[in-house]
Amino acid sequence: MTIEEMKIRRKELGLSCRKLSELAHVPFGTVQKIFTGSTTSPRYDTVQALAKVLSGKGKRYSDDEQDTMDISKVNEAQPAYRTYSISPEGYGTFETKRSIGNKTIEDYLALPEGTRVELIDGEFYDMASPTTIHQSIGMEICVALRDHIYKNDGKCVPFIAPMDVQLDCDDKTMVQPDVFVVCDRNKIKKTRVVGAPDFVVEVISPSNSIIDISIKTLKYKYAGVKEYWIIFPMEKIILVYDYTKITANGDVTGKSYTFDDAVPVSIWGGKCKVDFKNIYSRIEFMYKMQ
């Protein structure tokens, strides 16, 4: 969700900056700076916290109603599932409590051929076709990972979307990460991967930002993914979650990089680095296309 989209959504919900600050656990001054335009490049932890609140389909709230409103009213757009939590640095812990939906992998497989959806905890989520920038970034990352594996005679296997991943080994979730690596070859079947990949990359598109930033961040963490990268192509930011470094109370903090960085892959001890400056030099012309 972009800053402009957040501004529009805040007006649709009728939320004051102060109430949004309370719901998102983001300092009031920070919220004011973002929505007045004095801050044009807020931290992605901040964006994640605000987007979580603003992603709902709640009604428009009057000033009086805001005094008693509950965050659950704002988050009705996100279907309910198990209780998960994540703590962006400095903004407390967010919990998502959901009851599992009724869709299954059988329903997923029965969809018309070519239908682009993911199944997450029994709920379908539409997937838009990737842009040229989106697809190129994913391919370049996959090639970098593959080259590292080959050079080190590794047993891990890289994949690029579309490839089904039965994430929880149950019949309620089937996702298609943009790029992922599986090191336990027993998880690789003829038609899909069954179980959590070791490493996952999602490249953000406007249509999937809330799913990748909020829902999948939690899903991947609790499914057993060791490392999760979220790529923001237009902002040229990489947000890295190392799920092997979770605190005693279960929190994890994302670390930000830019397209000027060579980002280390933690599952291999940083021996592999994805050079985003090099990647951007190859695809920069795409940013100028209509």
Image (cartoon, grey):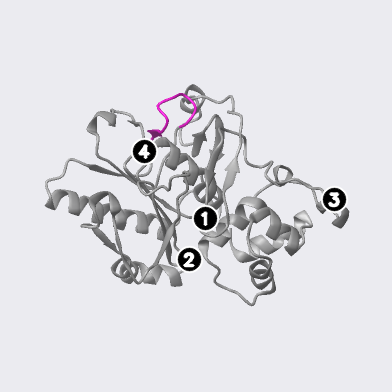
- Residue underneath mark 4: 163
The numbered disc on residue 65 is 3
Pick whichever of labels 1 and 3 is earlier in the sequence.
3
Pick whichever of labels 1 and 2 is earlier in the sequence.
1
How many C-alpha atoms fall within 10 Å of the one at disc 1: few (<14), some, or many (≥20)? some
Q: Is residue 9 visible?
A: no
- Residue underneath mark 2: 234
Q: Give the alpha-carbon distance from disc 4 to disc 3, as whole Å.
A: 45 Å
The magenta stretch spans which residues? 164-173
Say what amino acid the circle numbered 4 marks: Met
SS category of the residue bearing label 1: loop
**What residue lies at 64% left-to-right and 61% top-to-bottom?**
5
- Above or below, 91 against 159 in this view is below
Whether residue 12 sits left or right of residue 104 in the image: it is right
Q: x and y percent of residue 146 in the render?
A: 22, 50
Q: Nearer the viewer, mark 1 or mark 3?
A: 1
Q: Nearer the viewer, mark 2 or mark 3?
A: 3
Q: Nearer the viewer, mark 4 or mark 3?
A: 3
Say what amino acid the circle numbered 2 marks: Met
Whether residue 60 sits left or right of residue 151 in the image: it is right
- Residue underneath mark 1: 88
Q: Quadrant of residue 99?
A: top right
Say what amino acid the circle numbered 1 marks: Pro
The numbered disc on residue 143 is none
Q: Quadrant of the N terminus?
A: bottom right
